[in-house]
Amino acid sequence: MSWDSKLIDRAKEIIELYPQKRSALGPLLYLAQEKEGYIDDDSVVEISKLIGITEVQVRSVASFYTMYKQEPSGKYLLSVCKSISCEINNSKEVIDNIKEFTGLANNETDIESTFTFEEVECIGACGGAPAVQINYETVEGVTPTKALELCKYLKEEVPEVIVADELQDKFGGTKSFDWAIEDNSGTSSTAPGFQIIGTSEEK
């Protein structure tokens, strides 16, 4: 299904932020992911028209970066860091507990489309290892026990908007540094919540 007029208007507003149309490709891919949960063929066509590049060029960027999903994801994308800082702080047991709870292997989605699980490289929270992201909202200092509690919370409470501050208070531990400004905005999709491109929501 092609983009509606509201989404196209939003895309054009984003394009206006850049000196060259093609520079808006990344944010437009996030719009596409917010719309469908992944980068579908219709979105590739629409984006190529909007910024004047080929569909192959759009697809090459969308398929290169792992944050742009090529197939539908679950409501909650669970990303667990496995880089060295998280590894030495027991991310393996966090990963094992999440995999056991969800029944998923790496890069799998459950049949209810509730969870997608992925093991990822560094997400920039080494001082708060081990770190987990839910729809790209980061929670630091997650213990194996808290990882299970987090999964149960998502499955039972089914929050519509995922907010890092809230999850950090409920399930996090040591942080890389104090988060100076309280932020009640988050995301309701597997597209990261960016206020400037309109993919974030207030809770």
Image (cartoon, rainbow, N blue to C red):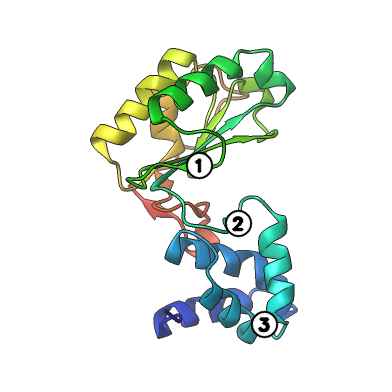
Distance from Cα at disc 1 to Cα at disc 2: 15 Å
The reply to whether callout 1 and callout 2 are in contact (CB within 8 Å) is: no
Q: Quadrant location of residue 83?
A: top right
Q: Is residue 42 above or below residue 49?
A: above
Characterize the local packing of mark 3: few (<14), some (14-19) or many (20 or more) Cα atoms within 10 angstroms. some
Distance from Cα at disc 2 to Cα at disc 3: 18 Å
Residue underneath mark 2: 68
Residue underneath mark 3: 51
In the rendered structure, find residue 108 and report the number of the disc placed on it: 1
Q: Residue at x 72, y 82 (%)?
A: 54
State the SS at label 2: loop
Among numbered discs 1 and 3, the one appearing first in the sequence: 3
Q: Amino acid at mark 3?
A: Ile
State the SS at label 1: strand
Q: Is residue 36 above or below residue 166?
A: below
Q: Amino acid at mark 2?
A: Tyr
Among numbered discs 2 and 3, the one appearing first in the sequence: 3
Compared across the picture, whether 110 is left or right of 65 comes to left
User: Can you see residue 87?
Assistant: yes
Compared across the picture, whether 124 is left or right of 189 comes to right
Q: Amino acid at mark 1?
A: Glu
Kindly report which numbered mark, 1 or 2, lies closer to the viewer in this rendering: 1
The number of numbered discs placed on residues in the rendered structure image is 3
Q: Quadrant location of residue 177?
A: top right
Q: Is residue 135 above or below residue 157?
A: below
Q: In the image shown, does 129 or 151 lie closer to the viewer? A: 151
> Quadrant where the N terminus lies?
bottom left
User: Can you see residue 197?
Assistant: no
Among numbered discs 1 and 2, the one appearing first in the sequence: 2
Q: In the image shown, does 31 or 71 lie closer to the viewer? A: 71
Residue 101 position, x and y percent, is: 39, 25
The reply to whether callout 1 and callout 3 are in contact (CB within 8 Å) is: no
